[in-house]
């Protein structure tokens, strides 16, 4: 729970429920519009990975996905979440960032589940026959994901501790015993905290910009997009578009935009790579029969 300063602008008081539950200060119709657009981004991301979850379940595997794509996406979302909390970005940005990470973890767990489910028997056969290459490869991949999840857990706990009251109160819970003076919504933390959050935010932008590359390369190597959900990438584009729009609608001041530039770059900058994936969907679905499709890992028995 927090309060907004000033209490009103041009005779318009701030909306108390938005401040109490989301830590956001809404005065004007422009603020309302930004807030609603930001919430719509959450709904797009709420749906975003569902098509791929279903596609993996329908196929009984997740071999169409590049594990490096999933790992970089997870690390990028984690850095985005930590940076948004430390620098106290818009509450809707923080809520969206936390949801991103939750979905990524579920996708990674699903990938690991299908990988071991479909490969454990073949790897055991490899051990019996004296070929341990498949086992080593599977173990390395599991270790890679395990290290990523462990790093995420430690970093997230540290961010929430350092960010203090910057996380939206709707996520941290209502405090029964309030201090006499409610904190001011969006009040910046110490300079070192803002600097650290900004550096992490730039790191997340770099990770986002490179996250699609492993998937694009894998699609090219397979000469196929079979098993990959177009709906996931369409939803990602709409989620990023509304995410960035909520920032632009709120304020077009140069300093305001610069403070949020890493998050804008990480969302808008992925459009080019998503467009490349769309082109791959169009091309391989219409011309894929001209190529000899490279079998998946499961089909090769690796």
Image (tube, grey):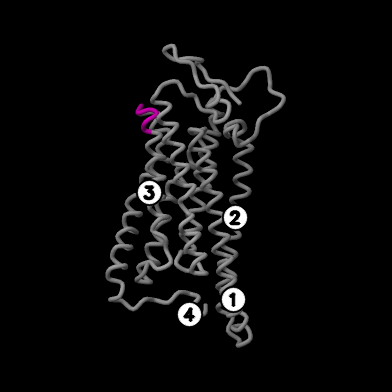
User: Which image quarter holds the N terminus?
Assistant: top right
- Residue reaching furthest to the top: 11
Give the structural element (helix, strand or loop) at label 2: helix
| Above or below 29: residue 45 | below
Closer mark to the observer between disc 4 and disc 3: 3
Q: CA distance from mark 2 to mark 4?
A: 28 Å
Q: Quadrant of residue 187?
A: top right
Q: What residue did someone put label 4 on?
A: 300
| Residue 240 position within the rendered picture, expressed as x and y whole percent measured from the top left | 40, 44
Closer mark to the observer between disc 1 and disc 4: 4
| Residue 297 position within the rendered picture, expressed as x and y whole percent measured from the top left | 48, 75
Q: Earlier in the sequence, mark 1 or mark 3?
A: 1
Q: Of residues 273 and 16, which is closer to you in this image?
A: 16
Tags 1 and 4 touching, CB below 8 Å: no
Q: CA distance from mark 1 to mark 3?
A: 37 Å
Q: What residue did someone put label 3 on?
A: 237
Q: Magenta stretch: give its range.
A: 248-253
Closer mark to the observer between disc 3 and disc 2: 3
Give yes or no for residue 254 being in the magenta stretch.
no
| Above or below 289: residue 244 | above
Q: How many marks?
A: 4
Q: CA distance from mark 3 to mark 2?
A: 25 Å
| Residue 233 position within the rendered picture, expressed as x and y whole percent measured from the top left | 39, 54
The crowding category of the residue bearing disc 3, from other C-alpha atoms within 10 Å (few below 14, some 14 to 19, many at least 20), is: many
Q: CA distance from mark 2 to mark 1?
A: 21 Å
| Above or below 165: residue 63 | below
Q: Earlier in the sequence, mark 3 or mark 2?
A: 2
Q: CA distance from mark 1 to mark 4?
A: 14 Å
Residue 57 horizontal side relative to residue 288, left or right: right
The crowding category of the residue bearing disc 2, from other C-alpha atoms within 10 Å (few below 14, some 14 to 19, many at least 20), is: some
Give the structural element (helix, strand or loop) at label 4: helix
């Amino acid at each position: 729970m927090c309060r907004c300063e000033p209490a009103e602008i041009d005779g318009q008081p701030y909306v108390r429920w938005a401040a109490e539950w989301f830590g956001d200060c809404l005065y004007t119709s422009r603020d309302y519009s930004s807030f609603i657009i930001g919430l719509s981004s959450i709904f797009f991301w709420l749906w975003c990975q569902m098509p791929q979850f279903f596609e993996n379940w329908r196929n009984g595997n997740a071999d169409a996905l590049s594990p490096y794509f999933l790992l970089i996406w997870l690390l990028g979302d984690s850095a985005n979440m930590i940076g948004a909390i430390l620098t106290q970005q818009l509450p809707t940005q923080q809520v969206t960032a936390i949801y991103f990470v939750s979905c990524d973890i579920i996708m990674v767990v699903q990938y690991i589940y299908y990988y071991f489910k479909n490969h454990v028997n073949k790897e055991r056969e490899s051990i019996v026959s004296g070929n341990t290459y498949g086992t080593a490869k599977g173990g390395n991949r599991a270790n890679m994901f395990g290290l990523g999840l462990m790093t995420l857990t430690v970093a997230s706990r540290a961010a929430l501790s350092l960010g203090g009251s910057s996380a939206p109160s709707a996520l941290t819970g209502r405090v029964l015993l309030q201090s006499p003076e409610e904190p001011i919504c969006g009040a910046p933390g110490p300079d070192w905290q803002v600097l650290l959050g900004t550096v992490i935010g730039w790191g997340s932008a770099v990770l986002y910009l490179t996250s699609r590359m492993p998937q694009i390369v894998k699609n090219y190597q397979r000469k196929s997009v079979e098993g990959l959900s177009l709906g996931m990438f369409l939803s990602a584009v709409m989620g990023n578009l509304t995410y960035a729009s909520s920032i632009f609608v709120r304020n077009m001041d140069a300093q305001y935009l610069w403070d949020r530039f890493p998050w804008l770059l990480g969302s808008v900058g992925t459009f080019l790579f998503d467009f490349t994936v769309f082109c791959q969907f169009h091309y391989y679905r219409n011309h894929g029969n001209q190529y000899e499709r490279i079998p998946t890992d499961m089909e090769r028995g690796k």
